[in-house]
Image (tube, coloured by chain):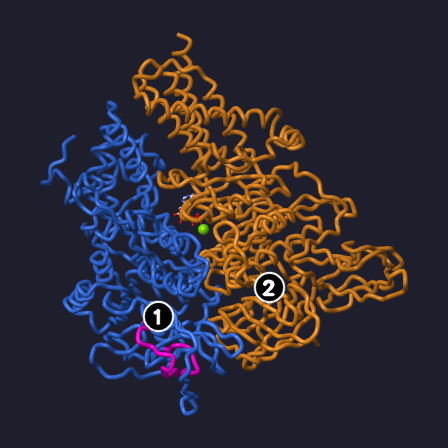
Amino acid sequence: MNTGKVTGVISNLIFIEVEGAVTQNEICLIHSENKRLLAEVIRVKDAQVSAQLFETSMTIKIGSQVDFTGKMLEVELGPGILSKKYDGLQNDLTKMSDLFIEIGQSTAPLDEDIFYKFNPLVKVGDKVYAGDWLGSVLENWIDHKIMVPFTLKGGYKVVTIVNSGDYRIQDTIAVLSSEKGEKVIVTMVQKWPVKRAINVYRQKIRPNQLLQTGLRVIDTLNPIAEGGTGYIPGPFGTGKTVLQQSIAKNSKADVLIVVACGERANEVVEIFTEFPQLTDQVTGRKLDEKTTIICNTSNMPVAARESSVYVGMTLAEYYRCMGLKVLVLADSTSRWAQALREMSNRMEELPGPDAFPVELPATIANFYSRAGLTELKNGKWGSVTFIGTVSPAGGNFKEPVTESTSKVARCFFALSQKRADAKRYPAIDPLASYSKYLEYPEFVRNADELIQKGWVEKVKRCKNLIQNGLEARDQISILGDDAVPIEYHTAFWKSELIDFTLIQQDSFDNVDMNSPIERQQYMLNKVMAICELDFPFTEFEEVGTYFKKLINLLKQMNYTAFETKQFRNYEASLDKELLGIKEEIIN
Amino acid sequence: MKTKAFKRIYTRISGITKATCSLKASGVRYGELAWVNGMPAQVISVVDDMVTVQVFAGTEGISSHSEVTFAGAPPTLKVSDLLASRILNGYGEPIDGGPALRGEARIIKGNAVNPVKRSKPSTLLATGIAGIDLNNTLVTGQKIPFFADPDQPYNQVLAEVAMRAEADKIILGGMGLSNDDYLFFKNTFTEAGVLDKVVSFINTSENPPLERLLIPDMVCTAAEYFANDRNQKVLVLLTDMTLYADALAIVANKMDQIPSKDSMPGSLYSDLAGIYEKAVQFAHGGSITIIAVTTLNESDITHAIPDNTGYITEGQIFLKKDTDIGKVIVDPFRSLSRLKQNVIGKKTREDHPQMMNALVRLYADAMDAKTKKENGFDLNEYDKRCLAFAKEYAMDLLAVDVNLSIEQMLDTGWFLLKKYFEKFEVGIKEELLNQYWDERKIKEPVNSPSHGTEVSL
Ligand SMILES: Nc1ncnc2c1ncn2[C@@H]1O[C@H](COP(=O)(O)OP(=O)(O)O)[C@@H](O)[C@H]1O
Ligand SMILES: [Mg+2]
């Protein structure tokens, strides 16, 4: 094995003198007391290597031995990933016994003693390629495919395959043989380097199908597609985390990967305590059964923030290869960028804007491009949808992380301080935010089928009404209430109606927190029917009073279970109010 | 310390800057405590045999032949129950004239708690201040700063909260504290008869600024001892974290690091998070709650210090002067408690969440009306009602000098809503309206204007 010696320590940057060949991003183990501390090579110059340590460095002595592993940072892929709580390096946090995370502690990501019921999907003699399904086991309720290792190149023949039965993850499941006769033993586990995309699919196509999140302001107004990308920038306290968590709770994804990257530990604790109690919208099973949490909170090693997002993405790609819909949520990608900045500064690299590394835009673009809708080699479809939060310094979107992300993410959910201050939650700015998928013809066609004919058209009309309303509001505030035509007030109050009943949604109310698409369809139709009326108001003060009554009734409806008796009662009161006004229109 | 007997003395310093010294030394580790001329210092870089130490008190008076020794370990604090009632400096040494500390020497930058071993903080921490308890309810195990301009009475409010909150231990970390404020805290604790449950780590504005750098870690180490080893409810007070961050910037600057926003080091977020994340609720009942002060410059929360703080802490309590009522209030817009969800409507009355939001929304309408008025427009009838409501709301609920139970605060809320608004204007669920608007008999609030102060409608 290739070894070296520690020659310097500055915080978590370690200088090493090495004897043999080293590779960029190779993992090395630094001997410290009786532990081995993990570090990643980030620069090589002759025999001088710089490595970032995934720990605190206080115990390391100059001259300590360093072992180079010859491998990049890898994850273990196999059944048992779901429901796990990993740190940023895929250590299973639950397996650590102490209250505090001891330096240099590592635990196995998977469980070697559990028996899984295996069913073969191939026969001896079949020809297989990387990523092909050899068999499947049941993981929680998910049909977990055991696949031909992604690292294999070219065609292989199945030499042996075990019968249906109970096996552990390290048991041999199949033996494959290459054209040259090289034998490969396959177990239920394989390894993959996190910084490389798993690309054993046939093709990646444009996302075209709505991924339901249960949030009106997203699904109706700014929809994200299966395999799509989105980002949520916002100043602190505007609701990034709450928004992501409500998406997590209500989305119709098969598998959920939550990456808590450099943020608060208590927010992860909330997931730990809530998810096992919550019910998944699709299967009715508990939410934690389809969820894996990667947790590198702000007080955990800074260098592992970067790896945490890559670990999350790689696990997602793995499940995508099984033909599943995977949703990855990362909070916050800015912390990862900051970790890159800390290291780059310590290495005294020439800085880019705001002292971030120059390659930041490329790093972000490369990462977002790993999401996508893919057709597998067997014709099945799988997707990875990615939504990241961004925490811009000073709440100013003109900063490198927000700007670089805006170039690659297709949905933009901009959180506004002003809306958050006024408790208009979710504080998504209706004008600034967008979804590029509304422009995809294939998405429009699918919405016609899934929801109703002309759906996207209607959504766009609704967005226009919001814009008109806000323009009217500006005029009113410049000219004064009675100096503008009454239509300005009506336009403004229409946009308020849309705001209060479609955009705003109470994430802490048991009913309102989740709105399935059928209910959103009802609401958009109802609201648009109101907005398309010609109102006979003569005094501007009437407008606000009338609309507040409608808003109040629609809000009560949002708080009430869909299509129940109570719901119908509110609907009847609403229709009565509307009938009154229609009669006035006729007279 | 077992290495003490072999302690090597170095007497050749090859480089001196305003904050650091470099010298050739062997067997030294990053983060180790050292003494230069008897003054405490810490190793911040080891490359080959060249060691750089940061001298906390500054390098004035250090010569190239000054004596340097290394402790063989990072800075520590001697923890034991004997810490109670003591006053210590940034190195954890007594400055109260009492005996030297005894107990286990614990490294002050302890490991992180495994997130899966944390409990969800969900015990209400009542303060009697409605701007906090009603709108921004606190929970034990939370970390939250006061954001305040230097002319706000933040230390007074901090002390008030500390005295009213239930805690087994109070650990005060004073960083750049003025001597007057230091004495104020001391008097408050003495008068309340709680000195025996207070531990203070004090760096006043008279001490060297870099000595502040150790205070938060010292405080957290003591807090962790009482919270985890002794299962106690610990309340940590840190004032003023802005001065702590300024000290970080000084060191970074002396080290020629590339500054990021507002001349702050790029690692500011991680540095602050390392401190605030010590707040925790343990399953065994012990907890650490951190209430800090971050002073602002002209209420600018976009400056790197409050900005990074806001991204780390579980909300912030924003103090400001309300000129309409002539009092300091808790700003309902800028303030936030992120953990309030864990208790409001669950540990408090069911109408709490909706009442709190309704009041703030209507207050926002009032502020719009105010702007309208300032721009010279006529106010409509609704605007006028909002403005009248806002004044009473600020007086009865937002001012920091109120002291009420949460039940009283909610009743005051209903009283104000009924006085100024119609049911359909308040955006509250019908169930709650039925119960509280119609049925519940609500007494007029004690400090309502009809009992004295004039409010013109
Ligand atoms: N949809 C929402 N409904 C109700 N309250 C919300 C909502 N979103 C945010 N909040 C409030 O704002 C606080 C901060 O939200 P959070 O998501 O933690 O902000 P961020 O992650 O942007 O800093 C929450 O603790 C909650 O009190
Ligand atoms: Mg957040």
Q: Which residue is drawn at 32% across and 75% down?
A: B91
The answer to whether the residue bearing label 2 lies less than 8 angstroms from the nearest atom of ligand 2 is no
Residue drawn at x 28%, y 61% as measured from the top left = B239
* Label at residue A193: none
Q: Colour of chain A?
A: orange
Give left or right: position of B133 versus A424.
left
Report the magenta residues as a range: B58-76
Residue most extreme to the top: A587
Count neighbours of disc 1 (C-alpha within 10 A) and say few if under 14, some if 14 to 19, many if 20 or more: many
- The quadrant in which residue A505 appears is top left
* Label 1 element class: helix
Which residue is at the far bottom? B5
Name chain B's colour: blue
Residue B366 is a magenta residue: no
Residue drawn at x 70%, y 56% is A144
Would you say A196 lies left or right of B169 here?
A: right
